[in-house]
Image (cartoon, grey):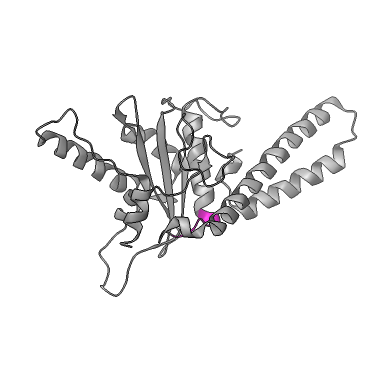
């Protein structure tokens, strides 16, 4: 069974209803195998409900603090679901969560100190774009692109195009710098995401995102939490001041 984090809200609600129906029908059974399945169903029901509550809290908090997002679009159900799935994939690859039953053992990557994922739902298609930003022990997180990309499927578009260009620019800048050891381009995930949009449109057609969700996926505490009590892996983020300045050009 795929992770519930990969499902949209409608599918989550259908699964919640199915688990509630199963528990109501078989919850009083004394047959041990049935009881085992009932307990698993209760566990999944709690997980699904918690996920749905968090997604709704993200939307409500973003709407309440709309002014803090600058000109960036607010999160929508589609990009929230995509971002939450990416957070799950990163934890799965870092062995922080158990893989689904029957899934082959995935490659292993480190859980990084500081990393964000930004996901945008496209204005002219069904796909999602996403970008990473952060470092682990001085190394750019772009090195874990292949492992993450292998789990994301065709719904996530242009990942390499968005992230690799900044990795290349970083290396070019360092090689031409008078002080290559200290040279650094600090680029957040949100500007990467917007710069990755295809600009080959007529001048009167401007590419945009319908919505955008940014989540913290580092081992440290979320430095810009959208929801004050949500500061761990997978928690929603507000844009930093540098990103807000960038949003004024959108």
Residue 158 % position (x, y) = 34, 50
Residue 166 is drawn in which quadrant? top left
Task: Work out whether 206 lies above or below 128.
Answer: below
Where residue 205 sits in the image (x, y, percent)?
Answer: 32, 72
Along the viewing direction, whichever of 94 and 235 lies nearer the viewer: 235
Picture coordinates of residue 84, whole percent (x, y): 53, 43
Secondary structure mainly formed by the magenta segment: loop
Residue 47: quadrant of the picture = top right
Depth check: give the residue in front, 176 or 67.
Answer: 67
**Quadrant location, the N terminus:** top right
Q: Which residues are magenta?
A: 73-78
Query: Percent position (x, y) of residue 207?
Result: 34, 65
Closest to the observer, 176 or 85:
176
Query: What residue is at 44 percent from the left and 45 percent from the top?
Result: 153
Q: Is residue 77 one of those drawn in magenta?
A: yes
Residue at position x 45%, y 42% in the image: 152
């Amino acid at each position: 069974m795929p992770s519930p984090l990969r499902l949209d809200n409608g599918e989550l609600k259908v699964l919640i209803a199915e688990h509630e129906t199963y528990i109501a029908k078989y919850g009083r059974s004394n047959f041990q195998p049935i009881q085992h399945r009932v307990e698993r169903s209760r566990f999944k029901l709690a997980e699904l409900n918690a996920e749905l509550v968090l997604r709704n809290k993200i939307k409500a908090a973003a709407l309440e603090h709309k002014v803090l997002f600058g000109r960036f679009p607010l999160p929508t159900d589609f990009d929230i679901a995509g971002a939450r799935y990416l957070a799950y994939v990163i934890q799965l690859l870092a062995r922080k969560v158990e893989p689904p039953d029957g899934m082959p053992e995935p490659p292993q990557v480190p859980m990084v100190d500081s990393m964000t994922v930004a996901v945008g739902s496209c204005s002219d298609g069904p796909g999602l774009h996403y970008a990473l930003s952060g470092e682990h022990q001085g190394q750019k997180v772009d090195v874990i692109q292949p492992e993450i990309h292998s789990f994301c499927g065709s719904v996530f578009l242009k990942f390499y195009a968005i992230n690799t260009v900044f990795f290349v620019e970083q290396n070019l800048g360092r090689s031409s710098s008078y002080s290559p050891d200290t040279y650094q381009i600090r680029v957040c995930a949100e500007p990467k995401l917007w710069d990755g949009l295809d600009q080959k449109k007529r001048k009167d057609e401007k590419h945009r995102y319908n919505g955008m969700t940014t989540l913290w996926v580092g081992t440290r505490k979320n430095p810009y939490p959208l929801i004050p009590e949500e500061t761990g892996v997978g928690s929603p983020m507000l844009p930093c001041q540098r990103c807000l300045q960038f949003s004024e050009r959108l």
